[in-house]
Image: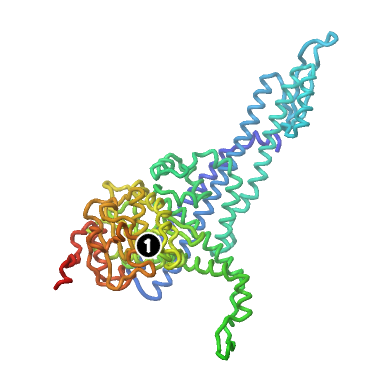
Amino acid sequence: MDIATLQALKPSEFEEAADGYRATSEMASTAKDKVENQIAAGIRNQLKGAAATAAVDGLKELAQNFHYVQTECALASTALNGFAYDMAAAKRKLEAALEDAKAAGCTVGADGSVTFPAGGKEVDGKVPEGGTVSASTSATDPTSAAIERQAVNMHPNPNFGKAVEFANRIGDALKEATDADAKWAPKLRALKADDDLKVTDRDWSDVKSDQDGVSDAGKKYLDSMPQPPKDSSPKDNAAWWKGLDDEERAAWLSLRPDSVGKLDGLPSAVRDEANRVVFDETRARYQMELDSIPKPPANEWTWITAGGYPAKVHTDEWMEWHRKYGDRYDFLDKSLRGMADIQKRFDATGTNGLPEAYLLGFSAEGDGRAIVANGNPDTADHQAVYVPGTTSDLNGIGGDVDRMVNLWNAARSEADGKTVSTITWLGYDAPDDVKKDAPFEHYAYDGAPAFTKFLDGLETSHTGDAPPHRTVIGHSYGTTLIGAAAEKGTLNADDVVLAGSPGVKVSHATELDVPKGHVWNEEAKGDIVPDIGRWGHGGDWFIIPSDPEFGANQMTTDTEGHSGYWNPGSDSLQNQALVVTGHGNDAPLKPPPDKWAHVK
């Protein structure tokens, strides 16, 4: 790039184009939300039949198109701003060098060469003549730099050294602009969609590629912005986000959606927007990878005779496939099943009045993480946060999400017209195996800080006139995590509901960091916590919430076993709904045990 081109370049024009793309992204986002949460939701809530189903399917595809436009236009906006930032920096360097050269009496040629005037002490009765040096760049090689410094020091005209400096600065600025142009050109060219009207897995996979490319090219641009706090409080996170302007927020959302989506304290709508991008990108990449793996052989089993008896074993072909692909295939398949269940919840918005879903956390790494809210917690009068127990992972998230849908439906009728948000919080590494892992307490203590921070984040991001009424609900090992959170920190909640608890690490309800009388327990008939034992994580003397000595309100249950507490229409579920909506005192309690029963 030459001087004239860089001087003529107007970064503001690229910034204006970036504003246009950002506006388009925002319009696409608004359209997506309207299609998903108003039009399609209204059809689900009011219409049934094949025509309604076909209409909803078409709207779903349209919403996905809008989401793709939203994401790609946001990336285009950020890329243009990043390019403008780099070129503006190079242009400022060039203009500063030209001004300094002019002030020093030097003349800069169109090719970047610098002509310096005569000057210095007379030599043989003559003032050292002026001359011209070519545009260059600052020497990076130590030997070259040393030779250049020696030449400057030996030259009789001091203006020579100044000219060399100006030429180097001009060369550096031109090189910086040339490098920026070469860096950004392919990134910007890549930001175009296929020439069709269908958004495919490959399209979403390309979004991830585009995101990585723009992120790499725009590192200086992003580094110039206020950085998110590291391991900070939700209030600090919220203050950081509030302090960003629209351009900066758009850049962080487009380039670092995985980071933004994890920040407790940010508005739920912002976290949802970020996590939805991560969700769609991940699902597309995983599906494409799964499709690339050969399917398992159809002849999985065969029979052999061993010791005179027939035995069913895997075929050699299946064992070979499993050795090569089995673990990865199972991981991808299970992860995609979990993502399909989350998508199913997205697609259920409007059904029987079900509010929009918010994806407040998502990761497919390891066993996976997902935080799914029914309704916006930021505006809800009542919030309920549910922590599932042992074996909970992304693959099984559907059942946990359904439980909170059931609770939302039950709580709606008890809320006296106020709003309710029920949240599934799979934000920790739950024990994988009831025998091998669940007896250990470290899963609870490892996950407790993240849970505490999430609750504090709900408090920070709430926008209502009055603080929300917040209930935390734990099932099985999830109750142990809640107890660990209360024991090691603060539990930002008004009520605690425990169901099927093997113990909460503390010995009395007053240690759970909620007002006295606001700990509620459910233990159904025949509920023996599998393989942990009834007191696996009890407090002193193995006391658990179901024991009278613990001091919890023992609510009645009409379900049986370990996992029926959220069955639709059950008293077990209805009692939880009463607590969630602030009517816990209306929940029927079990009569206290008869301490003289053994002598009757």
Residue 396 lies, in percent from the top left, at 43, 67
Quadrant assignment for the C terminus: bottom left
Residue 310 appearing in the image: yes
Residue indicated by mark 1: 477
Count of labels in the image: 1
Instruction: Check the image and report above or below for 520 versus 531.
Output: above
In which quarter of the view is residue 236 placed? top left
**Can you tell which quarter of the image residue 592 is in?**
bottom left
Decide which of 225, 362 is in the foreground and name it: 362
Q: Secondary structure at mark 1?
A: helix
Residue sitting farthest toward the bottom: 308
- Among all residues in the image, which is located at the extreme front? 599
498 w.r.t. 262: above or below: below
Q: In this view of the protein, which residue sits in the foreground, 353 or 376? A: 376
Q: Viewed as shown, does residue 379 lie left or right of 549? A: right
Q: Position of residue 345 (x, y in %)?
A: 40, 65
Q: Which quadrant would the N terminus be assigned to in this image?
A: top right
Most extreme residue toward the right, as rendered?
124
Where residue 251 sits in the image (x, y, percent)?
Answer: 51, 46
User: Which amino acid type is marked by label 1?
Assistant: Tyr
Residue at the far top: name it.
125
Q: Is residue 374 visible?
A: no
Q: Residue 31: give x, y in percent of width and height.
A: 43, 57
Using a 10 Å C-alpha cutoff, classify the residue at mark 1 as few (fewer than 14 neighbours), some (14 to 19) or many (20 or more).
many
Depicted 337 relative to depicted 178: above or below? below
**How is the model colour-coded?**
rainbow
Say which of 578 and 490 sits in front: 490
In the image shown, does 127 or 306 lie closer to the viewer?
306
Q: Residue at x 22, y 52 (%)?
A: 516
